[in-house]
Amino acid sequence: MSVRLHQRLQTTGYDLGIFEQAVHSYAHLYLPVSELKGPGFPLMGDHFSPVLATLAPFYRLWPSPLTLLIAQAALFAIAVVPLARWAERALGRTAAVVVAAGYGASWGIAQAVGFDFHEVCFAVPLLAFSLAALGGGRLGAAVAWALPLLLVKEDFGLTVAVIGGLVAWKGAWRLGLITAAAGLLGTVLEVLVIIPAFSLAGSYAYWDKLPSAGSDSGLVHLLYQGTVGMITPDVKVMTLLALLAPTAFLALRSPLILVALPTLAWRFFSDNPQYWGTGFHYSAVLMPIVFAAFIDALTRWPTTQVRHALTVSGVVTAFMFFQAPLYQLVQPATWRNDPRVATTQSILDKIPSGATVAATNHLAPQLTDRADVTVFGFPDSRPNPEYIVADTAIWDWPFATATDEVKQLNDALGHGYRTIAHRDGIVLLRRT
């Protein structure tokens, strides 16, 4: 599905292009930068994700955005293994099949696959292996799988801390407390020291996603957001229901569900509505958690009721499959090639390798493997690129309307650019 989305021009510079530029940097042995976010923008000053460097050898062999998309799909798939094996050991083959299908076809994974590439794909198998070990009483292995989460993204230190707390609760209190402390310290260092050291602004850029308490009204809003605001508006409750329904809500009966709290807390506490719903990639890391909690809860459930719970899980999984992007795999349109795609590729082929290009968002990842790409219309883009390429037939971020995009193209024609190709709404300009 990832490959077909890219071939059909349905991936974007924000975010696939950004991550490809990061991996390209590592593959050429320098710290990650992304022209898509600004000239020489240091990505270590945006998020702390050095785990991306593990893709560098593969990208050096095959420098393509497909390298990232296929790696992401593989990482999501690997997480099936520890969950299904644990379910089979504890509950039998039928439970293993239901859990494997439930996780593998889950809406959180499907939404992530349907929206470019993101570093959280590394967290998904790490969480699956860690929680399967934790549920099986292998506490040292649970910690060993959890600690690399600190290299995936700065907020996962909080998740590591919760896993450490559960390890302590299961009896290995010293190991658990050390793990929890490492997780908390890791997040603090990454957010307050490492990221600001690389940031162009000298601070962590995402504080503005949280409510401000700078005034009396701000403090009231902060208190509201931390209480009633955690379940309002209704979209947050709908996300919770969608998260728990595939487990017949039995995940709530396992302490492993606590591992989901840090991710849910920062998302629902934020003022950004994009974090609240079921779209994008934000829920991918929750899928191995809820299914691990489901297995753990079933191990304490009477056998007859286990069968009922597995039936409910299978039915919900089948129903939700038709609501998530994986359903596109059985739709004929997914496998048809739009003639505009061939037209677009023929125009993009006119851009030489190594050129500087400003491209509209959904055209950017078609070029990031061979050109220095910025987003056309993005105010922080590098000025005066050699080429500008845009699709005027559709609206694309960051323009407010398609008319604004055409206006900027006309402005470029009046400031040193000329048209060298214009077919099916695809416009290619070159600086003279």
Image (cartoon, grey):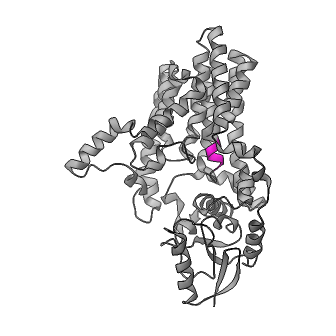
Q: Is residue 74 left or right of residue 301?
A: right
Q: Is residue 138 visible?
A: no
The residue lying at 54 percent from left, 23 percent from top is 249
* Residue 16 vs residue 51, the one in the foreground: 16
Q: Which residues are magenta?
A: 110-114
Q: Principal SS element in the magenta part?
A: helix
The residue lying at 44 percent from left, 59 percent from top is 197
Q: Position of residue 107 (x, y in %)?
A: 62, 38
The residue lying at 40 percent from left, 62 percent from top is 202
The residue lying at 45 percent from left, 28 percent from top is 177
* Residue 107 vs residue 121, the one in the foreground: 107
Q: Position of residue 306 (x, y in %)?
A: 64, 14
Q: Position of residue 345 (x, y in %)?
A: 75, 70
Q: Is residue 212 left or right of residue 43?
A: left
Q: Is residue 199 magenta?
A: no
- Answer with the quarter of the image where residue 185 lies: top left
Q: Seen from this angle, which residue lies furthest left?
A: 216
